[in-house]
């Protein structure tokens, strides 16, 4: 009897969700379609690796498990400094979307959902796109302080420059700040699953959908034990240290292009290299 090749696909959910915006045909506001996109990406990889028929469910015979990693929605509440109101993160559209997406992922065959958490990193902060402009006012602080104490210190040119810098602050609206959060435990779960499947000899090939170099140690362990590791960066450029420690770079989806729906488009090998 021919041995069935066992493949595991590990999707870094945060990375995956950011990257699918490159394919405008995928509605990122629809949890069902995002879940179907994740499933389609896995299917295309399995078919490419195993030469399974394009139609039917034979590809699932080669699947050990399909993993989707993300973080539980942040559910604390805090006071918004500009809106002057309490923000209940559990009731936000983002939290609702995440819960619906995770429920859709759970419904998919062979999928395992691995969830970390979101932790606070400081307090409300202007978005990065605003910070450069806001900091420009710092250069005028001494002149403005002097002017406040002594109106006779008025200088037309200095005042014009200070007012120009101040415009960045007056243009800052209520949505111009964010509450900094960081994923905790997601990378650890990915690394543990790679190590566990490798040492238990449960898989022949691991497809890692990410662009993060944090998984290099786990990838090196898998390769030393004879497991093939394929990286899918979803057409994002890859750092040399990451590409060095995988057996190949292969995209499940076709290259992003206007009007192309990667869920329906046939998988190509445009972005593929073997080490």
Image (tube, helix red, strand yellow):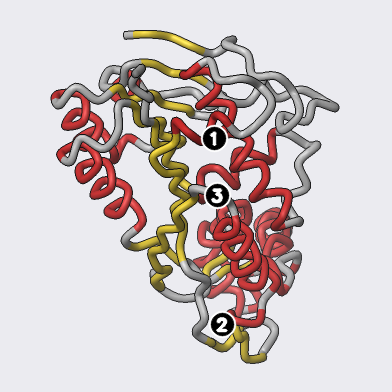
Where is residue 166? Give x, y as percent: 68, 64
Give the residue drawn at x 60%, y 74%. 147
Q: Quadrant of residue 194?
A: top left
Give the residue drawn at x 47%, y 50%. 68
Where is residue 242? Give x, y as percent: 32, 25
In the displayed structure, would residue 179 be above or below residue 201?
A: below
Q: Residue furthest front?
A: 1
Q: Which residue is label 3 attached to?
A: 109
Q: Which quadrant would the N terminus be assigned to in this image?
A: top left
Q: Which residue is label 1 attached to?
A: 42
Give the residue drawn at x 52%, y 36%. 60
Of callouts 3 and 1, the N-terminal one: 1
The mark lying in front, picked from 1 and 2, is 1
Q: Secondary structure at mark 1?
A: helix
Q: Quadrant of residue 57?
A: top right
**Rounded to the nearest whole Å, what is the CA distance between mark 1 and mark 2?**
66 Å
In depth, the one of 144 and 255 nearer the eye is: 255
**Rounded to the nearest whole Å, what is the CA distance between mark 3 and mark 1?**
11 Å
The mark lying in front, picked from 3 and 2, is 3
Q: Which residue is label 2 attached to?
A: 149
Q: Are marks 3 and 2 in contact (CB under 8 Å)?
A: no
Give the side of residue 130 with respect to residue 4, left or right. right
In the displayed structure, would residue 94 be above or below residue 189?
A: below
């Amino acid at each position: 009897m021919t041995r069935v090749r066992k493949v595991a696909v590990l999707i870094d959910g945060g990375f995956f969700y950011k990257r699918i915006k490159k394919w405008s045909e995928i509605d990122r506001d629809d949890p069902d379609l995002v879940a179907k996109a994740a499933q389609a990406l896995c299917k295309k990889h399995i078919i490419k690796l195993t030469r399974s028929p394009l139609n039917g469910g034979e590809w699932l015979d080669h699947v050990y498990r399909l993993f989707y990693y993300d973080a539980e929605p942040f559910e604390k509440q805090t006071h918004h400094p500009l809106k002057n109101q309490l923000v209940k993160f559990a009731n936000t559209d983002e939290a609702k979307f995440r819960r619906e997406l995770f429920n859709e992922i759970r419904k998919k065959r062979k999928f395992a959902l691995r969830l970390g958490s979101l932790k606070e990193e400081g307090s409300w902060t202007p978005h990065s796109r605003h910070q450069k402009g806001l900091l420009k006012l710092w250069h005028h602080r001494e002149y403005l302080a002097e002017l406040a104490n002594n109106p006779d210190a008025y200088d037309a040119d200095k005042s014009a420059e200070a007012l120009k810098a101040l415009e960045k602050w007056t243009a800052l609206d209520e949505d111009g700040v964010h509450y900094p959060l960081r994923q905790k435990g997601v990378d650890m779960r990915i690394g543990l699953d790679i190590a566990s499947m490798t040492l238990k000899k449960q898989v022949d090939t691991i497809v890692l959908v990410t662009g993060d170099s944090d998984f290099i140690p786990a990838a090196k362990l898998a390769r030393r034990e004879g497991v093939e590791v394929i990286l899918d960066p979803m057409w994002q450029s890859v750092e040399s240290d990451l590409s060095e420690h995988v057996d190949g770079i292969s995209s499940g989806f076709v290259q992003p292009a206007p009007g192309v729906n990667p869920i329906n488009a046939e998988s190509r090998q445009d972005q593929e290299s073997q080490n």
